[in-house]
Amino acid sequence: MNMAAQMKDAEAPVLEVRDLTRVFSIGKSWLKEGKPLRAVDGVSLTVKRGEVLAIVGESGCGKTTLSRLMLGLQQPSGGDIRVLGEPLVGVDRKAFARRVQPVFQDPYSSLNPRKTIGQIVGDPLIIHNVGAPSERLARVETVMEQVGLPRRLVNSYPSQMSGGQRQRVAIARALVMKPEVLICDEPTSALDVSVQAQILNLLQDLREELNLTYIFISHDLSVVEYMADYVAVMYLGRFVEVGPAKQVLNTPKHPYTQALLDSILTPDAHLGLPQLDLRAGFPDPLNPPPGCRFHPRCVKAMDVCSKSTPKMVRIDDTDVECHLYPAKD
C-alpha cells in the first residue's frame, strides 16, 4: 500500500452505515403475499478507528439484524455499508473478513465441539492460506496467550472448558486474522457476573493493545457505560438517540432512553423494583404505529407524534429523533 492509500485509510471512518434498511417478508407463500417487517429502517452511523459504539435497545428492536448486516451475513434491502470508505458490496469476502470479525453471544453454541481449541482458532488461517503449519501454530499460541489462555490448552476441546474460557477462545478466533473491527453481539450475557467482568476487562485491554474498534450490541446499560465511547439507542428498527456515552447515559433526551435508564435495578433493596412510566407494551413490528413509533408508550406524546415521523436533530453533541426537539428550518 502506498503512502497516499495509507493516509486515505487513516482518514476514512473504519465503518460507515448510511440509511440502512432490512425488510423481511413474514408469512409469504405461493398463495399469498407476506407482510413486510422492517427490522432495520433507515439507520446511519459512523465509527472511527479505536472507538467503541454501543447499540442498545429492547429485545426485538433490530440490534442483531443490524449486526448481521454489518458483518455481511445478510444483504440489506436498501442503504449502504462502507468499510474504510469502500462499499461492502464491492469488497472481496475474504478481504472483508480480515478486517471485520464477530464475537457471538453464546460461547457454548458458537464453537465446534468436535475440534480442538488450536483447530478452532487456527481455521481462519487455513481458510485464508496464511503461513506454513508451523507458523500457524505459533500464531495460534500467541493469540491464545493474548486472551489469557495458556498454550497447553491448544489440544483441549470446548467441552473441557468453562464458559469464560470458551468466550476467550471465540475472541482469539476473531483476533487471529488481526482484524480492525470486532462486532460483539451480547458477548457476556451468557456468562456469570464475575466472568462477565473478566471478559469486559480483557476486551478493554485488547482494544488499547491492538487499537481495535468495537461495535458492541447489548441490552445491559451497566456494560455499555463501562465499554462505550458512543451510544446508539434503537427502537423498532430506528435510532432514536445517538451521541457520546456520557451524555446519552447521564442526560438522556429521548423519552425512550429515559425509560431504559429508569428500568435499571439498583443495589439498594429499599428502593424495590423500578416503576416504568410507559403507557403500553412493545408494539407489533408487523404493524408499527404511524408517526413516531414510540408515541403509544410515551408519557410526553403530543398530537403531532401520531401524525408525522420526527426528524433527527442535533442537541449539543447528541442526535435525537423526537418531536420534543423541533427541527430548525
Image: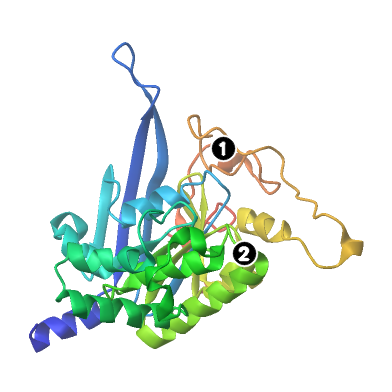
Q: Quadrant of residue 163?
A: bottom right
Q: Residue at x 65, y 45 (%)?
A: 301
Q: Residue 7 occupies which quadrant of the picture?
A: bottom left
User: Count of labels shown?
Assistant: 2
Judging by the rendered image, the residue that carries numbered circle 2 is 221
Q: Amino acid at mark 2?
A: Leu
Mark 2: few, some, or many residues within 10 Å (few <14, many ≥20)? some
Whether the residues at callouts 1 and 2 have beta carbons within 8 Å, the answer is no
Q: Position of residue 256 (x, y in %)?
A: 62, 53
Q: Which residue is located at x 33 percent, y 51 percent?
A: 20
Q: Residue at x 39, y 52 (%)?
A: 66
The answer, for residue 49, to whether it is visible in the render is no
Q: Which residue is mark 1?
A: 306
Q: Which residue lies at the image location 38% right of the left edge and 72% below the top edge?
A: 154
Q: What residue type is disc 1 on? A: Ser
Residue 319 rendering spot, x and y as whole percentages:
48, 64
Q: Nearer the viewer, residue 310 or 115?
A: 115
Q: Gap between marks 1 and 2, in whole Å?
A: 29 Å
